[in-house]
Image (tube, grey):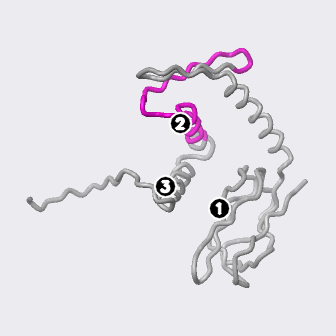
């Protein structure tokens, strides 16, 4: 059954412009993935998806003006709910059967459907190597399924959120410029 994705309460604005459409018909999205970016005279905001599923219809385009309750898209979410339940069940059986041994490197032995997997992570500073591995697997899946541009977008959003939350991140700027002024 299709689910409507509408503009949420955006404050005292009657009509705001859509400056970016972040999905297309046929895209498979997760809950809270951004659908569109709206811009008022004071700020821009991304509208998240209320559920996971497949976009079956887009009702807006860049430049359209929308208000609270305006229809943005329609989402087919029955099949994704079944997939999500299946993945949750698989993940919970892996988590139930994991064993972590502490040493300089960490070994995780996970059994799922009588198949044994050994994942070796070599950081003694990692307090949750299973979670770290899940993040890396997610990034690799994005690169494989949606390409490096999407992965880059997701990483930029994560870094933005980290800065917003007040985290101090290492400086990773790499430029071709060399300081030619002598000390």
Q: To which residue does mark 3 refer?
A: 159
Q: Earlier in the sequence, mark 1 or mark 3?
A: 1
Residues rendered magenta in the picture: 112-141
- Circle 2 packing at 10 Å, graded few (<14), some (14-19), many (20+), is few
**Residue at 72% over, 53% down:** 31
Is residue 103 on the magenta stretch? no
Q: Quadrant of residue 114?
A: top right
Asked whether the beta carbons under mark 1 and mark 3 sit within 8 Å of each other, the answer is: no
Task: Please state, as top left, top right, bottom left or bottom right, where the C terminus lies in the image.
Answer: bottom left
Q: Nearer the viewer, mark 2 or mark 1?
A: 2
Task: Name the residue at the right extreme.
Answer: 1
Left or right: residue 56 versus residue 93 is right
- Circle 3 packing at 10 Å, graded few (<14), some (14-19), many (20+), is some
Q: Position of residue 27 (x, y in %)?
A: 72, 52
Asked whether the beta carbons under mark 3 and mark 2 sit within 8 Å of each other, the answer is: no
Residue 132's disc number: 2
Total labels: the figure holds 3
**Residue at 48% over, 26% down:** 121
Image: 1 above or below 140 = below
Image: 93 above or below 39 = above
Residue 22's disc number: 1
Left or right: residue 7 versus residue 171 is right
Is residue 125 on the magenta stretch? yes
Element class at badge 1: loop
**Residue at 80% over, 61% down:** 57
């Amino acid at each position: 059954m299709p689910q409507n994705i509408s503009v949420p309460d955006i404050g005292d604005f009657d009509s705001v412009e859509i400056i970016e459409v972040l999905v297309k018909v046929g895209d498979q999205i997760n809950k809270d993935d951004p659908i569109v970016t709206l811009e008022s005279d004071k700020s821009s905001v991304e509208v998240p998806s209320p559920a996971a599923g497949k976009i079956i219809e887009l009702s807006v385009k860049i430049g359209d003006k929308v208000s609270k309750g305006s229809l943005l898209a329609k989402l087919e979410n029955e099949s994704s709910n079944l997939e999500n339940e299946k993945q949750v069940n698989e993940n919970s059986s892996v988590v139930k059967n994991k064993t972590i041994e502490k040493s300089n490197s960490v070994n995780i032995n996970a059994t799922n459907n009588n198949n044994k997997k050994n994942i070796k992570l070599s950081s003694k500073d990692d307090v949750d190597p299973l979670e770290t591995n899940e993040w890396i697997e997610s990034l690799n899946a994005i690169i494989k399924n949606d390409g490096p541009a999407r992965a880059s977008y997701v990483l930029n959003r994560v870094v933005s959120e980290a800065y917003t939350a007040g985290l101090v991140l290492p400086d990773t700027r790499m430029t071709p410029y060399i300081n030619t002024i002598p000390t």
